[in-house]
Image: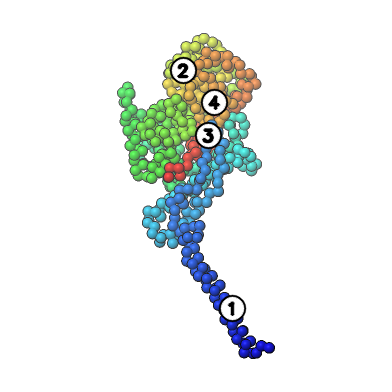
Amino acid sequence: MISKESKSSSSSFWSSSSFLVLLAVIVPLALISVLVFTLGPTQYSSWSPKPSPFTWRLGFPRSYSFASSSLVETGTPPHVFIANETIQLGEDENILKHNQSDETTQMVRRYSNLEKLEAGLARARASIRKAVLFGNLTSTRQDPDYVPQGPIYRNDNAFYRSYLEMEKLFRIYVYEEGEPPMFHNGICKSIYSTEGRFIHEMEKSDNIFRTKDPDKALVYFLPFSIVMMVEYLYVPGAHDIKGIRRSVVDYINIISTKHPFWNRSLGADHFMLSCHDWGPTASASVPELSNKSIRVLCNANTSEGFNPSKDASFPEINLPTGETTGLIGGPSPSRRSLLAFFVGRLHGHIRYLLLEQWKNKDQDVQVYDQLPKGVSYYSMLRKSRFCLCPSGYEVASPRVVEAIYAECVPVLISDSYVPPFSDVLNWKSFSVQIAVKDIPNIKNILMGISQRQYLRMQRRVKQVQRHFVVNESPKRFDVFHMTLHSIWLRRLNIHIKDYLK
């Protein structure tokens, strides 16, 4: 029998042992908890309060390609989150106190805004790709102005979605440096009218695509006019354009010194525009301007350095008096008695071959270097089924748009010419393209086009007119907006983060 004393002693022993065991368990756990709490924010967390340089430079790990000949995108954009993360970093007071200089803080904020712009472009690419794969939703096809449809487009769904995205996102900053008449100014009549009119439209304060805040811009316009430089700097007969080239170099030096945007992308998100034959030559004065910037050129000659993946072809439109009304229209196909027509001076070897082969040779294919007295040029366009548009000294010709205006099927005769808006428009559906070597076969080629096919092409010429119309106040889908869209497409190809590494 166990005594009370022994029971008490035993109970005290177990009580003391339990307390020691409990201490042996609790104390280590407490120490570990304190250690984790102390070291957790710096060693065990996946986020560090110090902003990494990658925070504002990365976020688009995949690249995308918009081929110049198509609106189809090759990749699907990933979820973009870096822009929001950067904003959080910039607003965190602890970061500002964590050995960060004002310069670093400004860098975070600047790249945060750039990332938001790039994220918007990524979403636009995804939207265009979706339109390519699945078409546009019915609701988006209820456009009060116009809905692109039909074979005149390479992909009408992609074009329409891209155009809507452009209207929503595209903003252009026009550099304010430079003085008229060579800057912020241009001729609005003659064959250089499209250059001058574009510059004047970009100068308007009510232009919805223009922004006064360069940090909100997707592209930057260099507002010099090569036509005006030729007018004021070139000495006729001197064959010397050094003054023009120097002016372009000086302007790029000025804007690259005063603003950070040119150096940020090496000019890739900048564009110039020229309808003068010397536009490509003038741009070559600055290697980055020629090789990296977007050049909108009438002289879209691939054999002379025009690069369709980054440069845009610009239509040459002759407005002799500057008037934009009364230019469009023509008789029905049944009232067009002439197979083909051309008149033009002996400019370049292509016209030489054309005149040599066809001048005064055939009543169906009427080719002149000068029209007979009393014969109207525009009446000849309107009575012809096909209008011959050979290149002159340079590849571009105002006859292409003149033919479209007159509802005459254009026949492009050139080497190395990229027609305007060919990213979007299917030129084969409404024009005939004849190689220079086939000039002797022009009649056979045109006679080989069936009446049914000709009627289809002529209807499509009438449909495509709206994209070449010059309006005093630009309207959606007209030549001004189509030019903007060409620039927009090329901006979609540019990833500024590639230049920030």
Could you tell me which secondary element the residue under label 3 belongs to? loop
Could you tell me which secondary element the residue under label 1 belongs to? helix
Q: Which residue is mark 2?
A: 350
Q: CA distance from mark 4 to mark 1?
A: 100 Å
Q: Which residue is mark 1?
A: 18
The amino acid marked with disc number 1 is Ser
Looking at the image, do the residues carrying marks 3 and 2 touch, with CB atoms under 8 Å apart? Answer: no
Query: On the image, which quarter does residue 297 sit in?
Result: top left
Front-lying residue, 457 or 52: 52
Q: Which residue is mark 4?
A: 404
Residue 436 in sight in this render: yes
Q: Earlier in the sequence, mark 2 or mark 4?
A: 2
Graded by Cα atoms within 10 Å as few (under 14), some (14 to 19) or many (20 or more), the crowding at tag 4 reads: many
Which residue shows up at 56% across the image and 14% down it?
Answer: 443
Q: CA distance from mark 2 to mark 4?
A: 21 Å
Q: Is residue 292 left or right of residue 423?
A: left
Q: Which residue is mark 3?
A: 67
Image location of residue 379, percent across then percent down: 53, 19
